[in-house]
Image (cartoon, rainbow, N blue to C red):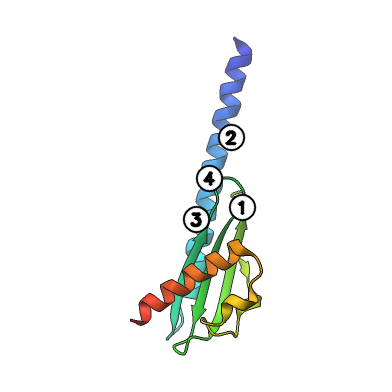
Amino acid sequence: MIAWGWFFIIFAGIWVLQFFMAHYQMKNYQLTMRELSTRDSGYLGVGVQKRRFGKGIVTIVVSDVDGTIVEARKMEGVTVFSRFKAYQDIVGKNIHEVKGSINDAQTLSSVEMAVQKINEQKI
């Protein structure tokens, strides 16, 4: 009986820790979004590509009014310890020409979703 008690205590502790780490990750997301949305002009798009099992990718793309990507950040991983990092591979490229410069299919899907969000704002 005591073993089950410890099991439930440890399980509850892990669950609470996961809750706080997910909260911390959301704060990081909100801070990054706030930081990237302070530009005077241009567009911001967010793309998400996640799998049931395996790493997920969130990409934030900022373009100017001409469609040139001025900043991009990418968060990828399987845990709540993942954070946004600069994604310089697509910076300086036009949003319509970015397809050819991304080799990873999951990253490409995430960036395409962000570009689609940008295009929806232009209409």
Residue drawn at the location 59% of the way across and 61% of the way down: 106
* Separation of residues labelled 1 and 2 (CA atoms): 21 Å
- For marks 1 and 2, the one nearer the N-term is 2
Q: Secondary structure at mark 3?
A: helix
- Badge 3 or badge 2: first in the primary sequence: 2
Residue 49 can be seen, yes or no: yes
Mark 4: few, some, or many residues within 10 Å (few <14, many ≥20)? few
Give the CA distance from mark 4 to mark 3: 10 Å
Q: Which residue is mark 4?
A: 20
Residue 96 placed where, x, y %? 51, 82
From the image, tell me which residue sits under label 3: 26
Q: Residue furthest top?
A: 1
- Across and down, in percent, residue 123 comes to 33, 81
Q: Earlier in the sequence, mark 1 or mark 3?
A: 3
Q: Nearer the viewer, mark 1 or mark 4?
A: 1
Tell me if mark 3 has few (under 14), some (14-19) or many (20+) residues whose alpha carbon lies within 10 angstroms of its own. Answer: some
Do callouts 4 and 2 mark residues in contact (Cβ within 8 Å)? no
Q: Which secondary structure, mark 4?
A: helix
Amino acid on which disc 4 is placed: Phe
The furthest residue to the bottom: 66
Q: Within 10 angstroms of label 1, few (less than 14), some, or many (20 or more) residues? A: some
Residue 66, compared with residue 75, is above or below; it is below
Looking at the image, is mark 1 or mark 2 nearer the viewer? 1
Secondary structure at numbered mark 1: loop
Q: Mark 4 vs mark 3: which is more N-terminal?
A: 4
- Point 65% across, 65% down: residue: 104
Q: Secondary structure at mark 2?
A: helix
